[in-house]
Image (cartoon, rainbow, N blue to C red):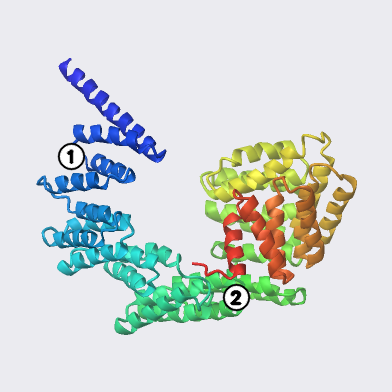
C-alpha cells in the first residue's frame, strides 16, 4: 500500500511539473515574459539539476532586458562546482546583447579552452555556439577537439556549418572525410550534396565538388571517387561522362555490371538514346553470362521500340524474332516475350497474334510472379482489343496468384479501370474504395482520381451519359486513337455544356492536343479552365500545364513565369507547388541550390 502511495505521489508531482512547464512555455511564446519567469524560477528552485529550467529562467530575464540578473545567475551556476562550460557561451552571449564585445569574446574563449580539460565538452559547447549562429566559434570548437584527438569526429557538424557559410570546398571535404571513415554514410552525404548541386555543370557547387573528387582520385585511386563522380555526372545529365567512371569501376571490380546497367536505364529514361545505346552495347560485349547478354538486349529492344518509326516496325519485329531464336522461347526469356508481344499488339496492331503467344507462354512452367506478369500483359492487350470480360478474368487471377505483391494492387486497379471503360461505374467504385487504402502511394493517388471522377459525375446525371462518353475517350486514348478521343471530348463540350464534367473534358482534351502537337488549341483549353473553373479542383492542373506549355513548347518564358506564380500564391496546397516554385525561380534567374 505504501509503495502504491509513493508511485501515485511520484506521478502526481511529475504531472504537476509538466503542466507548469507547458504553461510557462506558453506564456514565453506569447511574450508574457514576467509570468513565464515566475514559473521558471519556481521550477528551477524545485529542480536545481535541471539545466533546461535554469536556461529558460535566464532567457526570460534577457527578454525582459534584466541582463545583470542573467549575468548573476550564469556566474553563480558556473561557480557551483558542476561542469557546464557551455554556460561561458551563454554568458558571452549575454554580454553581446549589451554590446560588450570584449567580455563576450573573453567568455567565448574560456568555453573553447575548457575542451583541454575534457574533450567531451566540445559537443555542448559547439552546439551552443551554433544555437546563436556563432559559426566561426563553433568551427574553432570542433576543429580543436579533432586536433586534440583523432577519436573525435565533428565532420558532420563542420560540413553543415560550412554549407551555411557557402564554403563549398570545406563542406565537401568534411563530408568526404566522413564517407572515408564510414562508407555506409555515402547515401546520406549524397542527399546533402544534392542540396547544393544542380543539373547545371557550371553551378559553383558542382564545379567545386568535381574538382575535389578529381584531386582526391589522383591522390588516392579509390573507386569511391569514381562512384561519386558518376553520381555527380548523372545529376548533370552527362551520361557519357558517368559511363567513363562506371567503366573505370568495372575494370577494377570485375564481373559486377550493375552500375553500368543502372546507368543505361537512367539514360534511356531521360531519352538520351545515343548514350543509352553506347552503354548497352558495352554491356552486351562484356557480359559473362547468357543472362547478362539477354538483359542487355532487352534494354536495347526497349529503346528500338521507343524510337522506331512505323516504317521500321518490320525490322524491329525481325530483331525480336532473332533474339528469341538465339535465347529460346522459354521461361528464361519471359520478359523479352512480354516486350515482343506488347510491341506486336500496341505498335503493329497484331493483337490476335500477341494474345495467342501470351496464352501459350502462360501455360509454361513459370513462377507465380512470372505468370502474373504474363497475364497482366495479356489482360492489357485484351482491354486494348475491347474484350473486357476476358480481361477481367485474368486480372482477378493475378490478384489470387500474388496476393501479397504490389502486382495484386495493380491488377485490382485495372479491374476498376476496365469496369470504368465498359460503363460499369458501380463495380469500378467498389474496387477503387479498396485501393484508396493501398500501401502504394502512386496506386492510391490513381485510385483517388478515378474515384472522384466517377463519384462527382454520377450525382447530377443518373444516366451517366456524359461520364460514359468520357470513359470512351479515355479508352480511345489508351488505344492510341488520340484524334477519335479528341472528337468524343468535343461532343461532351458541345452537347453536355454546363455539366460538372466540362472542366475534366477540357483538361483531358488539352492534354491530347499537347500530345498531338496542337499547342495553340491546348493553350485555349487551359485558359478556359482558368477563366471559368479557377475555384475548382483542376485549376492548379491547368495553371501548371499551361506554364509548362509556355516554357517548353511555345517559347514564352514570361507567360510561363506568370502561371507558376499563380500556383505559388494561390495554390499553396497543390502537388505542383514545389516544382512551380523551382521553375519560377529558374525563369527569374535565381541561383537554385
Displayed quadrant of residue 194: bottom left
- The answer to whether mark 1 and mark 2 are in CB contact below 8 A is no
Q: Is residue 3 left or right of residue 382?
A: left
**Which residue is pictured at 61% across the width and 63% down the height?**
584
The foreground one among 215 and 415 is 215
Nearer mark to the viewer, of 1 and 2? 1
Question: Is residue 249 visible to the viewer in this orientation of the structure?
Answer: yes
**Which residue is pictured at 55% across the width and 56% down the height?**
370
Q: Secondary structure at mark 1?
A: loop
**Which residue is pictured at 55% across the width and 48% down the height?**
441
The foreground one among 437 and 27 is 27
Q: Is residue 330 left or right of residue 419?
A: left
Q: Residue furthest top?
A: 1
Q: Is residue 38 left or right of residue 110?
A: right
Q: Residue furthest bottom?
A: 218
Sort mark 2 into few (<14), some (14-19) or many (20+) by Cα contacts within 10 Å: some
Q: Is residue 357 above or below residue 275?
A: above
Name the quarter where the N terminus is drawn. Answer: top left
The residue tagged 1 is 49
Q: Is residue 238 above or below residue 30?
A: below
Q: Residue furthest right?
A: 495
The residue tagged 2 is 272
Whole-number angstrom distance, CA of label 1 to CA of label 2: 63 Å
Q: Is residue 336 above or below residue 81?
A: below
The foreground one among 403 and 414 is 414
Question: Is residue 395 visible to the viewer in this orientation of the structure?
Answer: no
Give how far across and how far down residue 508 sits, in percent.
76, 54
Give how far across and how far down residue 409 sits, in percent.
58, 46
- Earlier residue among tags 1 and 2: 1
Amino acid at each position: 500500500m505504501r509503495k502504491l502511495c509513493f508511485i501515485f505521489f511520484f506521478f502526481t508531482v511529475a504531472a504537476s511539473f509538466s503542466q507548469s512547464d507547458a504553461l510557462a512555455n506558453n506564456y514565453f511564446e506569447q511574450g508574457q515574459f514576467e509570468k513565464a519567469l515566475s514559473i521558471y524560477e519556481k521550477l528551477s528552485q524545485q529542480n536545481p539539476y535541471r539545466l533546461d529550467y535554469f536556461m529558460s529562467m535566464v532567457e526570460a530575464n534577457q527578454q525582459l532586458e534584466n541582463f545583470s540578473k542573467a549575468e548573476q545567475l550564469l556566474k553563480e551556476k558556473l561557480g557551483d562546482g558542476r561542469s557546464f562550460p557551455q554556460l561561458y557561451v551563454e554568458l558571452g552571449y549575454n554580454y553581446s546583447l549589451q554590446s560588450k564585445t570584449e567580455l563576450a569574446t573573453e567568455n567565448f574563449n574560456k568555453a573553447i579552452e575548457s575542451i583541454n580539460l575534457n574533450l567531451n565538452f566540445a559537443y555542448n559547447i559547439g552546439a551552443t555556439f551554433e544555437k546563436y549562429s556563432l559559426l566561426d566559434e563553433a568551427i574553432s570548437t570542433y576543429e580543436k577537439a579533432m586536433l586534440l584527438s583523432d577519436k573525435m569526429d565533428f565532420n558532420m557538424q563542420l560540413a553543415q556549418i560550412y554549407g551555411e557559410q557557402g564554403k563549398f570546398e570545406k563542406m565537401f571535404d568534411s563530408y568526404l572525410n566522413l564517407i572515408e571513415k564510414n562508407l555506409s554514410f555515402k547515401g546520406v552525404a549524397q542527399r546533402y550534396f544534392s542540396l547544393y548541386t544542380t543539373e547545371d555543370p557550371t553551378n559553383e557547387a558542382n564545379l567545386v565538388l568535381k574538382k575535389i573528387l578529381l584531386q582526391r582520385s589522383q591522390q588516392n585511386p579509390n573507386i569511391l571517387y569514381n562512384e561519386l563522380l558518376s553520381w555527380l555526372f548523372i545529376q548533370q545529365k552527362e551520361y557519357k561522362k558517368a559511363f567513363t567512371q562506371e567503366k573505370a569501376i568495372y575494370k577494377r571490380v570485375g564481373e559486377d555490371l550493375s552500375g553500368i546497367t543502372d546507368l543505361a536505364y537512367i539514360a534511356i529514361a531521360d531519352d538520351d538514346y545515343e548514350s543509352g545505346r553506347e552503354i548497352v552495347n558495352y554491356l552486351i560485349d562484356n557480359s559473362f553470362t547468357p543472362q547478362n547478354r539477354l538483359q542487355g538486349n532487352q534494354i536495347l529492344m526497349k529503346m528500338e521500340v521507343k524510337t522506331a518509326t512505323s516504317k521500321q516496325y518490320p525490322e524491329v519485329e525481325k530483331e525480336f524474332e532473332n533474339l528469341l531464336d538465339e535465347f529460346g522461347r522459354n521461361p528464361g526469356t519471359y520478359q523479352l516475350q512480354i516486350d515482343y508481344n506488347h510491341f506486336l499488339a500496341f505498335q503493329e496492331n497484331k493483337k490476335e497474334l500477341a494474345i495467342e503467344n501470351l496464352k501459350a507462354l502462360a501455360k509454361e512452367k513459370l513462377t507465380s510472379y512470372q505468370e502474373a506478369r504474363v497475364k497482366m500483359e495479356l489482360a492489357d492487350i485484351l482491354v486494348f482489343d475491347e474484350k473486357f470480360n476476358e480481361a477481367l478474368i485474368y486480372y482477378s487471377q493475378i490478384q489470387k496468384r500474388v496476393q501479397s505483391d504490389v502486382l495484386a494492387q495493380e491488377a485490382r486497379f485495372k479491374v476498376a479501370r476496365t469496369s470504368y471503360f465498359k460503363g460499369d461505374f458501380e463495380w469500378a467504385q467498389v474496387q477503387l474504395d479498396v485501393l484508396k487504402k493501398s500501401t502504394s502511394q502512386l496506386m492510391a493517388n490513381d485510385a483517388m482520381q478515378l474515384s472522384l471522377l466517377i463519384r462527382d459525375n454520377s450525382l447530377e446525371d443518373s444516366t451517366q451519359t456524359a461520364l460514359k462518353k468520357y470513359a470512351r475517350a479515355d479508352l480511345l486514348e489508351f488505344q492510341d486513337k488520340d484524334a477519335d478521343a479528341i472528337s468524343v471530348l468535343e461532343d461532351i463540350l458541345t452537347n453536355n455544356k454546363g455539366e460538372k464534367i466540362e472542366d475534366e473534358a477540357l483538361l483531358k482534351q488539352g492534354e491530347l492536343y499537347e500530345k498531338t502537337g496542337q499547342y495553340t488549341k491546348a493553350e485555349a483549353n487551359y485558359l478556359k479552365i482558368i477563366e471559368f473553373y479557377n475555384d475548382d479542383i483542376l485549376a492548379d492542373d491547368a495553371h501548371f500545364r499551361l506554364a509548362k506549355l509556355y516554357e517548353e513548347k511555345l517559347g514564352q518564358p514570361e507567360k510561363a513565369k506568370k502561371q507558376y506564380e499563380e500556383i505559388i500564391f494561390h495554390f499553396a496546397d497543390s502537388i505542383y507547388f514545389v516544382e512551380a516554385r523551382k521553375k519560377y525561380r529558374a525563369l527569374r534567374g535565381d541561383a537554385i541550390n
